[in-house]
Amino acid sequence: MARDIRFRDEVSPNIEFLLQSYSNTQEVIQFIDTKVGAYVALIGILASLLVSNLVHVLTELAGKSSGPIIYGLLVLTGLLALAFLYQLVQVFYRAYEVLLPRHGAALMEKDGAVGLFSASDISAYLEEHSLDEYAGVVDAMTEQDLIEELAYEAAKLSQIACAKLQHLEKAT
């Protein structure tokens, strides 16, 4: 059964503010994720170029006579490769830390918010209730209920953005 979606002609300044805050925070999170994704892609390309050249150099050195200088170069190149590999693992770990936060950690009490705005909350609600029940709850919400719900969601999203920014600062 399809429900009619009704919109008011005017939205209260409080709801407009919270929706804008939520939207801005989502854009910040998307920017951070895109920036880190591009950085990881660039590092991956550079690493693959370096590793292929390193393999070529090691092959060439190993084919030469085994004098102390060649042996020393092989050891030095191997140590540099291990240091590079360690740094590469660190870069990918830091990138993972930035991309990981998807939920606000140990959020404050909902203070009246039901948690019906984000996809994960809606999904959790629908595991125990029908779609009609969800639509009924949303339809019955007063403006104050909507403000509480949006404030909770904006705060939750802000925690995610702050966690990502903190990890990004550590990574750079």
Image (tube, helix red, strand yellow):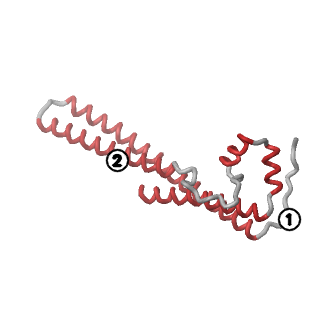
| Residue 70: mark | none
Tag 1 residue? 9
Residue found at the far left of this picture: 68
- Label 2 SS: helix
The one nearer the camera, 79 or 153, is 153
Q: CA distance from mark 1 to mark 2?
A: 55 Å
Please name the residue shown 39% across and 43% down the image. 47
Quadrant, the C terminus:
bottom left
Please name the residue shown 51% across and 48% down the image. 100
- Label 1 SS: loop
Tag 2 residue? 87
Q: Of the residues shown, which amino acid type is indicated by label 2?
A: Gln
Whole-percent x and y of residue 52? 35, 36
Neighbourhood count class around disc 1 (C-alpha, 10 Å): few under 14, some 14–19, many 20 upward = few
Q: Position of 158 compared to 58: left or right?
A: right
Please name the residue shown 71% across and 45% down the image. 125
Whole-percent x and y of residue 118? 68, 51
Whole-percent x and y of residue 7? 84, 59
Quadrant, the N terminus:
top right
The one nearer the camera, 58 or 135, is 135
